[in-house]
Image: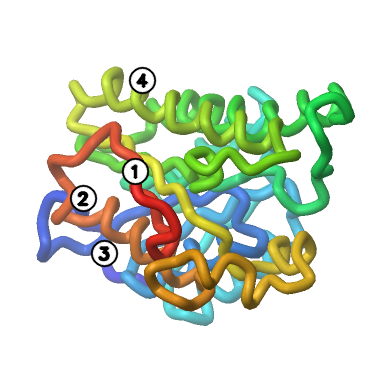
Amino acid sequence: MTGPRAQTRAGGDPGAVPGTVLVTGAAGGLGRSFALGFAGRGYAVAVADIDETGAAETARLVEAAGARAWHGRLDVTSVESTEAVAAAVAEFGGGGIEVLVNNAALYAGITRAPIEQLDPEEWDRVMAVNAKGPWLMTRAASPHLTAGARVINISSATVFSGSAEWAHYVASKGAVIALTRVMAKELGARGITVNAIAPGFTLTEASYGHMADADSYGVDRGALRRASEPEDIVGAALFFAGPESAFISGQTLVVDGGRQFI
């Protein structure tokens, strides 16, 4: 269990006890890694996902790591569903949210095809989750974000390489970067920073589903000749949540082992 809630959010005082982080898409994969990474830093973790069973398992792992947890089914494409943010805040005493990680995305199982062959309905689903989702979540969380809170949006390094036959995914993740910049302007007056992380190909369950050679995919193109692990991305999120990044906002950090430079 974490200690008493700090009166000052952790990002503004290196000696403060961390508060609450809400992670979407946290039933597995990178989202679960974010939840456990923040738990390891002493945050109370609100685990949100459309997969309630997976969210419950992540919450169990968070508690096993010694942190407080809440979990709930949450569909980031639904206005009504995103209002579950209030329940998460209430679970931890109503003190608000110090960190929001907009991680939920459609990635596993989506089609790779030329633009002429992509299904328009799948395009709409990808855009609804990956681009509309971070907006709706931040919209719902905004009244609960503490002064000086951190919003972290998860984009993708594929935006900068323009992966062929994946137009809907790449476009949706490009929208996340654009949205990050607007959010930074709008929330900055409250001292809230908004930044994006653009991971490269990372070894998660979903990535193994996309690539038979996931362990070696693209390794020869990186400055660091190894595959990306979820912990590599979690470190960037912890940085954006911490005091060292207090004057950084509206930026996108590519975490891909030096496969591309922007």
Asked if residue 80 lies left or right of residue 157, the reply is right
Real-space Cα separation, disc 1 to disc 3, in angstroms: 42 Å
Q: Residues within 10 Å of mark 4 (few under 14, many from 20)?
A: some
Would you place residue 70 above or below residue 190 in this image? below
Residue 206: mark: none
Of labels 2 and 3, the one closer to you: 2
User: Distance from label 4 to label 1 (Cα)?
Assistant: 20 Å
> Compared to 190, does 56 lie above or below?
below
- Let me know if residue 230 appears in the view: yes
* Mark 1 or 3, nearer chain start: 3
Instruction: Name the quarter where the N terminus is drawn.
Output: bottom left
Residue that carries the numbered disc 3 in the rendered image? 4
Q: What amino acid is at disc 4? A: Val
Is residue 10 left or right of 176 when viewed as pictured?
Answer: left
Q: Is residue 94 visible?
A: no
Which residue bears the numbered disc 1? 262
- Colouring rule applied to residues: rainbow
Residue 217 in percent (x, y) is at 63, 68
| Residue holding disc 2 | 9
